[in-house]
Image (cartoon, coloured by chain):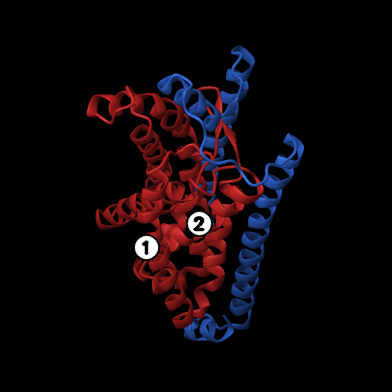
Chain colours: A red, B blue
Amino acid sequence: MHIMEGFLPAPWWQAWFAVSIPVILYGIYKMNKLVSEKREILPLLAVAGAFIFVLSSLKLPSVVGSCSHPTGTGVAAIIFGPAISAVLGTIVLLYQALFLAHGGITTLGANVFSMGIVGPIVAYLIYKAGMKAKLNFYAVVFLATAFGDWATYVVTSVQLALAFPAGDVLTFAGFMSSFGKFATVFAVTQVPLAIMEGALSALLFKYVVNVKSDILVEMKVIEDAAVKKLRGTSV
Amino acid sequence: MSRKLEIIVLAIFLAFGAQFVYMSSTTDAEYGGADGEAENVINEITGGAYEPNAEPFWEPPSGEIESLLFGLQAAIGAGIIGYFFGYYNAKKSHENELGYKGKNKSESDRQSL
């Protein structure tokens, strides 16, 4: 669930655009460079984008009695890095803002920041740290994508709490009070959905490893030896 | 190929589904969107004083149309994923059949995208 159209007062919606636009531009630059250098990654890029499309269209019921949807950006972040994920996330957010009145054009900057930038960065960092610690590949993918999804909604809560602090003036206490309320709505709802997203992402990676591991090796997502081990033991 | 991961994922999904069936039959939760609830929180914090500063250009005229567009979004995504996984899978088994396995695979991938 993204911040709805019109629900961020000035100057916050402009501020989030100011943060997000440079990242999107950098992502477009990186994506163009990557595609022109390695055309063979194009199908995998499409799959990563399509995965975001599917997951962010599935509004799932959560334990607390409200619905929200996963983001799906963790897969793109692990393979292509956060900047390119921001571009893919922007495409999905635009579709939903224009055709579904879900999210919005004025709040696009803020929503790209949470779903396209912070979520993927969290997923990317957890993935790199987990692989360095030599944990099981699929467990690392699960943790990275689940926490990336969850981080998106924590950031959404922060953004709303900054714009709507309790007592109308932005103080630390007012921010924390509002953050608590928004986090109850967003972050708590999201916990089971983040677990689902992590599980589904791990499964997607299993199939990518099975049919197209050479691209993952080429993108330095995973080492050749690790692929052989995964296929040998075949989880 | 072992199916351990599939079984784990299926177990997680079943647990989620069972939880939903149980919760929805024992409580009167509305299962509305979390963004609608956020709107209530905003009203509560500001005392109802906040007016949205923009309106969506276009809104789906009904819940049915909205489901249609969400379904369309999922279908587009699922189609793309299925197409490329099918393509890669068939390509891989074809190559194995022809005995290309030992050759430099990344070279052949580069030429054929």
Q: Position of residue B43 (x, y in %)?
A: 48, 23
The answer for which chain carries disc 2 is A
**Towards the viewer: A152 or A94:** A94
| Element assignment for label 2 | helix
Left or right side of B51 for B21: right
**Towards the viewer: A72 or B103:** A72
Task: Assess whether mark 2 and mark 1 are in contact (beta carbons under 8 angstroms).
Answer: no
Mark closest to the chain's N terminus, 1 or 2: 1
B104 in relation to A205, above or below: below
Left or right side of B82 for A197: left
**Towards the viewer: B6 or A36:** A36
The answer for which chain carries disc 1 is A
A198 in relation to B46, above or below: below
| Element assignment for label 1 | helix
On the image, numbered disc 1 is attached to which residue?
Answer: A22
Residue at 49% across, 39% down: A3
Residue B4 visible to an observer of this rendering: no
On the image, numbered disc 2 is attached to which residue?
Answer: A90
